[in-house]
């Protein structure tokens, strides 16, 4: 079951330090750019993932082709892709051991949601991570000594 209660959303966000954005953009006019910047400004480490701009930088972070390249633990995979492309994001999240997949507003793919949940990942569906984090006034845990 996707998380919907404020308590559950707050617990997920406040226990997560690293968020990978699949479909990150380097265009300031795109929602993923604004969300990534806001999350970064509020203490989360945001890892941009987009094969079209691999090697560029977004909010001073290197852009990766896919999650398998990242090499650091990822707490939440935030999906800014078309619904029909969400399954690939879920498979990547499972492969790297993420704990949750956040499907942004408009990203509803029942098969991808079911796959994530069957693999033991928490899911949040058709919600904006920035809006919920701001509304709930949560912040990430402090950085570890290894960051």
Image: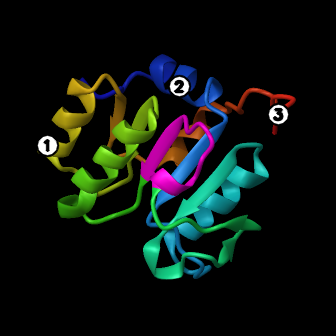
Which of marks 3 and 1 precedes in the sequence?
1
Q: Residue at x 44, y 66 (%)?
A: 23
Q: Residue tagged by mark 3?
A: 146
User: Looking at the rendered structure, which numbered label has been put on residue 110?
Assistant: 1
* Residue 94, image quadrant: top left
State yes or no: residue 72 in magenta.
yes
C-alpha span from label 2 to label 3: 21 Å
Which of marks 3 and 2 precedes in the sequence?
2
Residues at badges 1 and 3 in contact (C-beta under 8 Å)?
A: no
Q: Residue at x 55, y 20 (%)?
A: 11
140 is higher (above) or lower (below) than 19: above
Pair 2/3: label in front: 3
28 is higher (above) or lower (below) than 147: below
C-alpha span from label 2 to label 1: 21 Å
Toward the left, the furthest residue is 111
Q: Quick check: can you spot residue 130? A: no
State yes or no: residue 20 in magenta.
no
Instruction: Give SS at disc 2.
Output: helix
Query: Does residue 112 appear left or right of residue 4 in this picture?
Result: left
Q: Which residues are magenta?
A: 67-78
Residue 53 position in % (x across, y down): 53, 80
Residue 35 position in % (x across, y down): 58, 59
Residues at badges 2 and 1 in contact (C-beta under 8 Å)?
A: no
* Few, some or many residues within 10 Å of mark 2 (<14, 14–19, 20+): many
Q: Residue at x 51, y 45 (%)?
A: 129
Instruction: Give SS at disc 1.
Output: helix
Q: Residue tagged by mark 2?
A: 12
The quadrant in which the C terminus is found is top right
Q: Quick check: can you spot residue 24? A: yes
Residue 133 position in % (x across, y down): 59, 39
Toward the right, the furthest residue is 145
C-alpha span from label 1 to label 3: 37 Å
């Amino acid at each position: 079951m996707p998380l919907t209660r404020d308590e559950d959303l707050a617990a997920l966000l406040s226990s997560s330090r690293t968020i990978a954005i699949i479909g990150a953009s380097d265009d300031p006019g795109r929602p993923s750019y604004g969300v990534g910047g806001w999350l970064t400004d509020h203490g989360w480490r945001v890892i941009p993932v987009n094969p079209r701009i691999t090697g560029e930088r977004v909010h001073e972070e290197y852009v990766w082709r896919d999650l398998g390249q990242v090499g650091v633990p990822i707490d939440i995979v935030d999906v800014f892709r078309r619904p029909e492309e969400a399954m690939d994001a879920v498979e990547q999240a499972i492969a790297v051991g993420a704990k949750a997949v956040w499907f942004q507003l408009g990203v509803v793919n029942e098969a991808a949601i079911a796959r994530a949940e069957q693999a033991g990942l928490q899911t949040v569906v058709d919600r904006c991570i920035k809006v919920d984090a701001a509304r709930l006034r949560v912040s990430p845990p402090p950085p570890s000594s290894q960051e």
